[in-house]
Image (cartoon, rainbow, N blue to C red):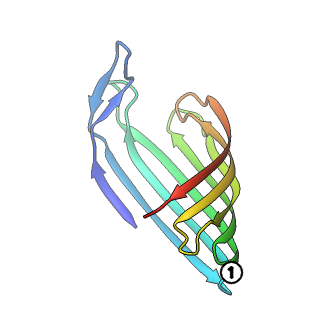
Amino acid sequence: MTYYGRKDQVQNQGTPDEFTYRPTIHRYGVFGNYLFFDKLDVIGGYLRGQDDWKDMLTSTTTNLTSNGYRAEVDYYFRRGTAAMARFDRIAQKIRAGPRPNTQAWGVGGLHALTELGNVVLRASYNYERDADPVSGAVNTDKLFKVDLRLMW
């Protein structure tokens, strides 16, 4: 997959030096999945980004580059019951800034409560470590989620 486009960007929002500019956004990547023995689904992908970046209105335009990886494994015990594990990682770099890595992982499972599979009980635990590409500040989140999906 590939994407090339432009979009208005509000920089330094809410501060006295707020400004808007129109950077070029360029992304390309490859993704795939394969189902082994009708039981094990392996999913993976890579996404590269190279976007225009501007800190201040008067500064020169540089690049924000990113390399993102994703991997997921789903195991189907039987029809309507599955377990999953997922890992995501993205490395970002602005020319004058730090080189932070953002990563997330999760494990969970689901079970269909009806023969049609339109009512599903799902539970997961997710951990995220987000890093800001400008300041390098890190924020972590841990989330345990149980939900009931109704699909018609």
Q: Nearer the viewer, residue 11 or 107?
A: 107
Q: Position of residue 133 (x, y in %)?
A: 54, 36
Q: Is residue 115 above or below residue 27?
A: below
Q: Residues within 10 Å of mark 1 (few under 14, many from 20)?
A: some
Q: Nearer the viewer, residue 67 or 78?
A: 78
Image quarter (top left, top right, bottom left or bottom right) of the N terminus: bottom left
Give me the residue at 51% from left, 49% from top: 66
Give me the residue at 70% from left, 57% from top: 108
Q: Position of residue 21 (x, y in %)?
A: 27, 33
Left or right of 101? Residue 2 is left
Q: Nearer the viewer, residue 94 or 118?
A: 118
Q: Quadrant of residue 26?
A: bottom left
Identify residue type, mark 1. Answer: Lys
Image quarter (top left, top right, bottom left or bottom right) of the C terminus: bottom left
Q: Nearer the viewer, residue 3 or 107?
A: 107
Q: Say which residue label 1 marks.
A: 39
Q: Residue furthest bottom?
A: 37
